[in-house]
Image (tube, rainbow, N blue to C red):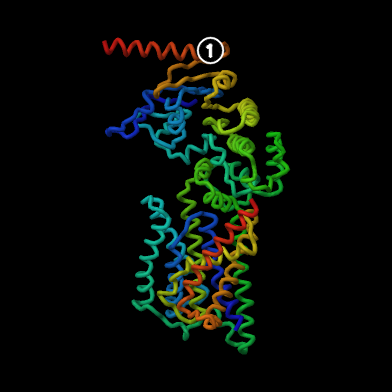
Amino acid sequence: MLEGIFFEGLIYSLMVLGVYITFRFLDFPDLTVDGSFPLGAAISAFLLINGFDPFLSLIFAFSGGLLAGTITAIIHNKLKVPGLLAGILTMTMLYSINIRILGNRANVSLLKTTSIFSFADSFSNINKEFFIIIFLILFILAIKSIIDLFFITDLGLSLRAMGNNEKFIIQLGINPEILKIIGIALSNGLVALSGSIWAQYQGFSDVGMGQGIIIAGLASVMLGEFFIFSRKNIFLMTSSAIIGSLIYRTIMYFGRFYGYYINITPNDLKLLTGLLIIFSIIISKIKKREYL
Amino acid sequence: MIKLENIKKIFNQNTVDETIALNNINLKINEGDFISIIGSNGAGKTTLFNIISGHIFPTSGDIYINDKKVTKEPEYKRACYIGRIFQNPTIGTASNMTIEENLTLAYKKGMRGLKISLNSKMRKELKEKLSLLNLGLENRMTDLVSLLSGGQRQALSLLMAVLSKPTLLLLDEHTAALDPKNANVVLNLTEKFVREYKLTTLMITHNMSHAINYGNRLIMMDKGEIIFDVSGEAKKKLTVEKLIDNFHKIRHTELDNDKILLE
């Protein structure tokens, strides 16, 4: 039972890392993720049905996300529209594109295709879940390490400065538009990767699976910062995103399975998520007032 | 050498709000010049800086830097060889990053790659540079910049601006938001850096004695025009009184001219 939390939390943690990058580093609330999560899932579904290698499909899903993020950034840069609107535009257009990728269907089953988890099929049921969790932990840690490394490079440093102070970036002789493209693309790449793995794990790709992803991501980011808060150490920052994802999924898990005692149905989970964010913000405000 | 030719900047052109911010500015800035610029509010000092830095483009006229026409070059490209410090100390740094990260960013201008520059060798070098400020910041390399005072931040901005040895340094009232003690610290550092690195510098100030005491050349602006430009020996002899006299004399003749025109 509880291993379900780990599966969900770990797979979604890639999405939370993506949201963390736009939300905390770029200061760009990016709604594209509601479209790039199912985009990653749809791309993988299409490729798996056509017999591609599941790991290769991850690379294509990631690239699809990069492209989606690039489009949002270009809309924002060139049309000078606010980031929120640019994200909504891409997200809405992606809804139609995702249905096309899925072959004009809203839902595609992947139960009969191979997945990145197929390697565990040879193990007995208990071992299988154990190995999948180990595999996921290693996979997430590898991606996290790459991100940690990226954000201490010169380019990574300039991306972090970007959300802090755009004028400063211009003074450094850097075109902020290019940094926005890199940052938002990277973020959506991770989100699409997360969507691709999630689809392979649950055995289907659904066009509606992206609904509320941004809110879940934000809630996870904020919950994570209660436990590990840092503005300096990139290792701690990405760790907090992953921890936040696990905590959020734990809360949602209990909401789903034990919520009926207090009359919470699965339909109330979005409400629960929203309230979670509101409470997180209130608590962090109270904390700040105490320390100032 | 930087050359401005017939620079004109009109805001809200062809509307009722039309304002001429700069009117036929011709200015030659020689290499090594340290020019202080004074003038009342609305004289066009900051507009002049915005045009030189490429933040806005002139309505007409051209800008040459080392004989290269840069009139339409975007601000971020020009920033590679023009350093600028603003009145607001928060503009020149990234506050949610550490001192060493800020300095690393400022070490080189232009787009970055995937190199990791912030290593122990770099840290040692940055520490040496920071000790030039004499503010003890070299022992706080991993502190967030948001923890620094306005004066410390402005001194850090100054160091960051000169690290890349810009062709031209623009100081836009960079001590105006500081208390007198910190303002003096930053001004003395400014003079030290300008002298040591032989930086060509333009400095806007509202403080006439600063304008007289610092630099080898003084420019006075009024209503979008340069009305007074002294350098060398003539500048050394200037006093605040003479400067105000001069200002009134020039303004007065203008008024007289207007009167003549009206009659």
Judging depth in this view, the residue of A23 and B4 nearest the camera is A23
Chain under disc 1: B
In the image shown, does B242 or A149 lie closer to the viewer?
A: B242
Q: Is residue A101 above or below residue B229?
A: below
Q: Which residue is identified by label 1?
A: B241
Viewer can see residue B145:
yes
Residue B147 lies, in percent from the top left, at: 64, 45
Residue shown at 63% from the left, 51% from the top: B116
- With respect to residue B83, does A175 lie above or below? below
Asked if A194 appears above or below B115 in the picture, the reply is below
Please say whether residue B197 is visible from this viewpoint: no
The picture quadrant where one finds residue B129 is: top right
Which image quarter is the C terminus of chain B in?
top left
Which residue sits at x=44%, y=74%?
A209
SS at badge 1: helix
Compared with residue B175, is residue A92 higher up or lower down, i.e. above or below?
A: below
